[in-house]
Structure formats: structure tokens, C-alpha cells
Image (cartoon, rainbow, N blue to C red):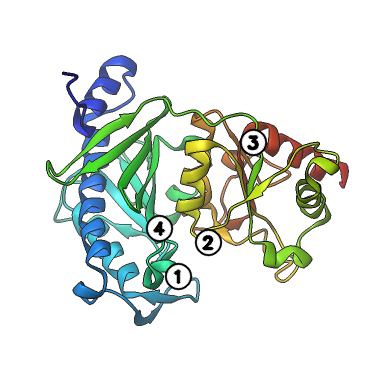
Amino acid sequence: MTQSVNLTRYLVEQEREHGVITPQLRLLVEVVARACKRISIAVNKGALGDVLGSAGTGNVQGEVQKKLDVIANDVLIHANEWGGHLAAMASEEMDTVFPVSEHYPRGEYLLLFDPLDGSSNIDVDVTIGTIFSVLQIPKNTTDVTEQHFLQAGNKQVAAGYCVYGPQTQLVLTVGHGVAVFTLDREQGSFVLTERDLQIPPSTSEFSINMSNLRHWAPPVKRYIDECLQGKDGPRGRDFNMRWVGSMVADVHRILMRGGVFLYPWDKREPNKPGKLRLLYEANPMSLLVEQAGGAATTGSQRILDIVPTSLHERCSVMLGSREEVELLQRYHAQTV
């Protein structure tokens, strides 16, 4: 009988094989995973746990917070603040950074997270998830500030998400491929169910909110129009469209079977480069996609090369199967 590999064993093996995981980083990932298990339990209780509906508060983005947004944010902070592996945290739900208290030992890592992506879907029981990113601070740093978080996505030392659907799965990269773990509720642990996940380079499936078509830039309109023409158009094959409205759910599907996800700039807010948050959503998902052989772009720039200027910076996102993302890049280049 093949012995199952849990998350801890996988991280130890990665440390031995590649030497990229320090004991602090291993602890950090394990603590985030444990926090995700707690969030999964709260999500699964739903109405029975009185966790549905609005919390009656708003976040820094001006969005109404759901009860589970607040619960998930608190779970991640309280799980990570005392372990000695972090210097500070930043969350999509908080105005500014959360430094580790002076009462606790301080580590060399920074944790950034979207505690509950897709939270508008909570009350209708659609797949949601937690996205996280890990950065490192320079040694001997005394006071951690917002500036330390403003690193390009290619500086991430780990990234992942936990998806709360029919199964609870943790999708993780520590810089050497993408691994998928499934929560075994009987054991209470995440068990490795897929190594070295790879996105097919070609696809016939796209994911975008079609109701916004009239607002998109010409290159995106051109790409989608050609997909909709199917085998009668220049692409020469039929395409399917899938849209959940939860980035975790849509990107998870693309990682599992291929596709391209688009949340592009649109003219309703022309001064904003996009809607998705660079540090909490675009960067970790882009690292996962690239580690799985895909690509991620704003249309004009590789997402992981963007140097942020603010904690809650937004960007346009197009990611997934490499051939489709490269085609989108060519269409954008032709309009410059």
C-alpha cells in the first residue's frame, strides 16, 4: 500500500531536495494550512453557525464585509501572530500592515492574504477560498513598514490558496512546481493528491464576466469576439465560457484542466489599471500559474514584474494556458 504524504512531509522533502524552505517558512505554511482548516469548518457550518450575511462593516476597498470575511481575517491573524515566523502581515480587509507584537518573537517573513476571496458568493453556497503570499524581509530589519511589502511578485518565496468547495484543497508553490493537497477530514490533515501540476499550453475555454463586454479595451474585445466565432472564425475551433465570479474557483478550474481567466481594465474606471488586488490576488495566483507552466499578464506587462507603489494597488489580470495569454499580449502590443 502506498503511504500517503501529508503537508509536513512534503515540505520536509522540498527542504531536503531544493534547500529553499527554512524551518520558519515550513512553520508559516503549516500554520496557514491549519488556519484554513478552521475557516473551512466555519464555511461548512454556514447558517447553522450564524456566519452568513453582512457583518455591518466595510473594508478599506469600500466593500461591505461579510461575517465570514471578518472571521477568516481574524483566524489568520491570531493563528500567525505568535509563532515567531513572521515580522508582519497585510490583508485585503485591513487598511495598513499588522506588525507582530513586541511581546512575541519576530521572524523574517511577511504574510499577505485575501482571507475569503469570492465572499459575495458566500450566502448562495458557491465555491470560495483563501489566497496567500509570502515575502521575505532583509535581515536585521528593525521596524517593518508598508514599504517592505511593496516587492515585485517575482520576489515571493511561497504562494497558494485554499479552496472551500465539495472538497477542501490547498494548492501550494514554494518555487519548485505546484502541489495539490486535499483535506482528509478523518485524519484532520492535508494529504498530497497531485505533484507537479501542469496547465495545458492550449485551451478552448475562457473565463470572463461577459456582462462587461461594452466596457473592455479593443484587444480584449477582439480576443473574446474571435473565441465566440468558434470554428467559423479565425481561431478555427469552438470555445466554451465558464464564469463563477470567485477568482479562487475560476483559477482552480484553469489549474486543473486549462483555460484562460480574464479580469481586464475597463472604461468605467479608466484611471484604475484594473480591479483585482496585485498583492493579495494577482501576484500569488500568477506565481502558481507560472509554476504550473502557464503565463500571467496585464496585457502589456508580466504581472510578476510589477513593482507595487501601494498596499492595495490594483491591476488588470489575464492568466492561464500559455498560448492564449501570449495571443492576448500580441493583441495588446498591436494597439500600442
Q: Looking at the picture, does residue 276 appear above or below residue 22?
A: below
**Marks 3 and 2: which is nearer the front?**
3
Mark 3 / mark 2, whichever is N-terminal = 3
Q: Looking at the picture, does residue 197 appear above or below residue 70?
A: above
**Mark 2 residue type:** Gly
**Mark 1 residue type:** Ser
Q: Nearer the viewer, residue 266 or 235?
A: 235
The residue wearing badge 1 is 120
Q: Which numbered dot is residue 72? A: none
The residue wearing badge 3 is 203
Q: Looking at the picture, does residue 276 appear above or below residue 291?
A: below
Mark 1 / mark 3, whichever is N-terminal = 1
**Rendering quarter of residue 78:** bottom left
Q: Secondary structure at mark 2?
A: loop
Q: Which numbered dot is residue 245? A: 2
Q: Secondary structure at mark 1?
A: helix
**Rendering quarter of residue 193:** top left
Between the residue at mark 4 and the residue at mark 1, the CA separation in whole angstroms equals 10 Å
Mark 2 / mark 4, whichever is N-terminal = 4
Q: Are marks 1 and 2 in contact (CB under 8 Å)?
A: yes
Between the residue at mark 2 and the residue at mark 4, the CA separation in whole angstroms equals 9 Å
The residue wearing badge 4 is 127
